[in-house]
C-alpha cells in the first residue's frame, strides 16, 4: 500500500467516522427530546396555564389583570404558540446534537428517564416560573433604568 493510498484511506475513514458520530448524536438528541418528561415540559410550557404564567411574569409593574383576563390570554397565547412546537422540537434536537457529546446525551437520557430525573423535570417549569416571577419586577425596573443608556449605544454610528 502506498503512502498516498494510506492517506486517502485514512481521510475516507475519518470522514465516515465523523458522519457516523454526527448521526449517532442526532439519534440520541432525538431520543432525548422525545422522552415523555421532556415532551410533558413542552406541553406545560405551551399550555394555557403555562402561557398565562409567562405573560403574568412579564407584565410591567402597576399593570393588573383579572384571573379571567389572564385565563383568556393564556388560551389565546397557547393556541397561537402551538404552531411553533414542531420548530421548537427540531431546534432542541439540532442544538442538542450539536452541543452535547454522545456520552452527555446518553447521560441526559439516563437521568431524565430515571425516577429522580423525571421528578426534577416535572418541577423545572414551576421552579423557573417561581424564580423569574419573584425577579420580574426587579428585572423590569433595571431594564427601565438602563434603557436610556442602551438607546444611546444603539444610536451611535460606526
Image (tube, helix red, strand yellow):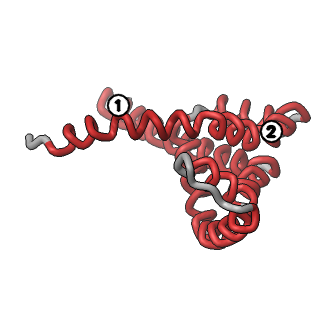
For the N terminus, the image quarter is top left
Q: Is residue 10 above or below residue 154?
A: above
Q: Tell me the crowding category of disc 2: few under 14, some 14 to 19, or many 20 or more residues within 10 angstroms, Cα based.
A: few
Image spot of residue 151 (x, y percent): 24, 43
Q: Quadrant of the C terminus?
A: top left
- Considering every residue shown, the one lying at the far left of the view is 158
Q: Nearer the viewer, residue 104 or 50?
A: 50
Kind of element beneath mark 1: helix
Q: Judging from the image, what secondary structure is the residue with disc 2 in?
A: helix
Whole-percent x, y for residue 31 in the image:
72, 48
Determine which residue is flagged by label 1.
Answer: 7
| Residue located at (75% from left, 61% from top) | 67
- Identified at 58% across, 34% down, the residue is 100
Q: In the rendered image, which quarter is residue 150 located in?
A: top left
Q: Say which of 23 and 137 sits in front.
A: 137
The residue that appears at 69% across and 60% down in the rendered structure is 46
**Residue 39 in the image: above or below residue 5:** below
| Residue 2 position by quadrant | top left
Tag 2 residue: 123
How many angstroms separate mark 2 from mark 1 (CA)? 52 Å
Q: Residues within 10 Å of mark 1 (few under 14, many from 20)?
A: few
The structure residue drawn at horizontal position 91% and vertical position 35%, both measured from the top left corner, is: 115
Amino acid at each position: 500500500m502506498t503512502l498516498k493510498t494510506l492517506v486517502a484511506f485514512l481521510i475516507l475513514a475519518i470522514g465516515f467516522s465523523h458522519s457516523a458520530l454526527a448521526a449517532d448524536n442526532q439519534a440520541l438528541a432525538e431520543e432525548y427530546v422525545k422522552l415523555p418528561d421532556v415532551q410533558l415540559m413542552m406541553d406545560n410550557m405551551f399550555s394555557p396555564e403555562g402561557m398565562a404564567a409567562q405573560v403574568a411574569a412579564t407584565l410591567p409593574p402597576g399593570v393588573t389583570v383579572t384571573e379571567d383576563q389572564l385565563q383568556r390570554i393564556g388560551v389565546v397565547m397557547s393556541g397561537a404558540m402551538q404552531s411553533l412546537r414542531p420548530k421548537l422540537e427540531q431546534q432542541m434536537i439540532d442544538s442538542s446534537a450539536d452541543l452535547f457529546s454522545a456520552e452527555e446525551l446518553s447521560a441526559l437520557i439516563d437521568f431524565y428517564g430515571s425516577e429522580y430525573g423525571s421528578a426534577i423535570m416535572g418541577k423545572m417549569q414551576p421552579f423557573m416560573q417561581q424564580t423569574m416571577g419573584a425577579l420580574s419586577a426587579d428585572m423590569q425596573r433595571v431594564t427601565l433604568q438602563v434603557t436610556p443608556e442602551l438607546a444611546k449605544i444603539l444610536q451611535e454610528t460606526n
